[in-house]
Image (cartoon, rainbow, N blue to C red):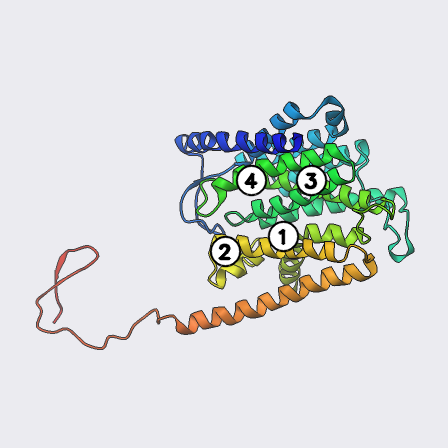
Amino acid sequence: MLILFTVLTAFLIGFLSMPVLIGAFKKMHVLDKPGGRKIHKSETPSMGGIVIIFSVLITSFLWLDLDYLVEIRYVIAALALVFFVGLRDDLVDLSPFQKLGGQFVATCMVVFMSDIRISSLYGFLGVYELPLLVSYGLTFVAIIGLTNSFNLIDGLDGLAGSICILTFGFLGWWFISVGMEPFGLFSLILLGSVLAFLVFNWHPAKIFMGDTGSLSLGFALSILTILFIDANGHLPAVNPWKFNAPIASGIALMIVPIYDTVRIFARRIRRGRSPFAPDKNHVHHFLMRMGLSHDKVAITLGVVKAFFIALVFIGASYSDYLMLPVILGTAVLFGSRLDVVTLRRVKENVKNAPPVLQPQTKRVKHRPYIQNPVTEEMHISDN
């Protein structure tokens, strides 16, 4: 019953608060204007992450008892810090180093105070316990990398929210099943809040989450995924909810942002550009070039994400020696096929499109006046 109340409360707070935020931003003309790399066509409010995090915090303090709050207190504090970094970036653009600095401090809180880290390779390559410094370094790279990878896929109506719902749903179920209720309930609170946002972000979006939301949710996803990897890796073999490939399972949960980031960085480097130079070559851009609408792209990538989660269940009894190549190989195969199909579809669209300049087949004569259909002004013909 507590699970139902937490999800429902988070959803209702977000659902009732979001129209208020949309109306306030419209009244204050705080709107995200189209143009450049942005693919929306009208001025739209952003910073919907304000309501997402607001509903997460309120619901957590309403329904989680003191013992649960104490256990996740540093996670909540770190999430609040990343939220303010994203909010500041939405209001006044921060430099990449400023944003990374805020994420670094938040990661320190989680790693050093909550001891959420990748502590082992769980038998993969014969490594069972990582040196402490290696563990810290690997965890920092993973959290900051995954946070910003998720931020990069937030470029389409409904996409980031759909990916969040699937991941938080899986994590909430798993943490509760293995007895980690505080983190399970926190994951489900995030699920309810994002679901309320998605009602208003589905195409055509009435509001975007902005860096306020994408950085915060990316950070939450990254730390909960790393906690899942480590907790799953240390579960006894007799536990019915143990996945024998903890590393591959964690990668599968974040496969969409991971693949998109690796792919886009590789393309930019191969073309002699900075890997951080923005462009419109993300996976969701390619799907739109195939003619898919915003909602169809979000559904397509959501189905891909669900497929990889299904692979985790199918391969639950297999180790990382098998599942890592399966997960990574399947992602590369899907991506390569997507590039081929997209290129063929774009060529077909260009081939079938009418020429931009149509040759004039007949010259109009003996008309002393020609009306301009655009300005509806009369001018004298040269004939």
Q: Nearer the viewer, mark 1 or mark 4?
A: 4
Q: In x, y percent, where is residue 347?
A: 48, 72
Q: Are marks 1 and 2 in contact (CB under 8 Å)?
A: no
Counting other residues with Cα less than 10 Å from the Cα at mark 3, is it few (<14), some (14-19), or many (20 or more)?
many
Q: Which residue is mark 1?
A: 276
Residue type (three-letter) at the residue carrying disc 3: Gly
Q: Are marks 4 and 2 in contact (CB under 8 Å)?
A: no
* Mark 1 to mark 4 CA distance (whole Å): 30 Å
- The mark nearer the N terminus, 4 or 2, is 4
Which quarter of the figure is the C terminus placed in? bottom left
Residue type (three-letter) at the residue carrying disc 2: Lys
Q: Nearer the viewer, mark 1 or mark 2?
A: 2
Q: Secondary structure at mark 3?
A: helix
- Taking the image as shown, residue 132 lies to the left or right of residue 2, namely right
Q: Secondary structure at mark 4?
A: helix
Q: Which residue is mark 3?
A: 172
Q: Which residue is mark 2?
A: 296
Residue extending furthest toward the bottom: 361
For image coordinates 77% across by 59% down, the residue present is 324
Q: In x, y percent, where is residue 142?
A: 74, 47
Front residue (pair 354, 85): 354
For image coordinates 89% across by 53% down, the residue present is 123
Residue type (three-letter) at the residue carrying disc 1: Phe
- The mark nearer the N terminus, 2 or 3, is 3
Q: Secondary structure at mark 1?
A: loop
Q: Is residue 274 visible?
A: no
Front residue (pair 334, 317): 317
Disc number for residue 195: 4
For image coordinates 65% across by 37% down, the residue present is 188
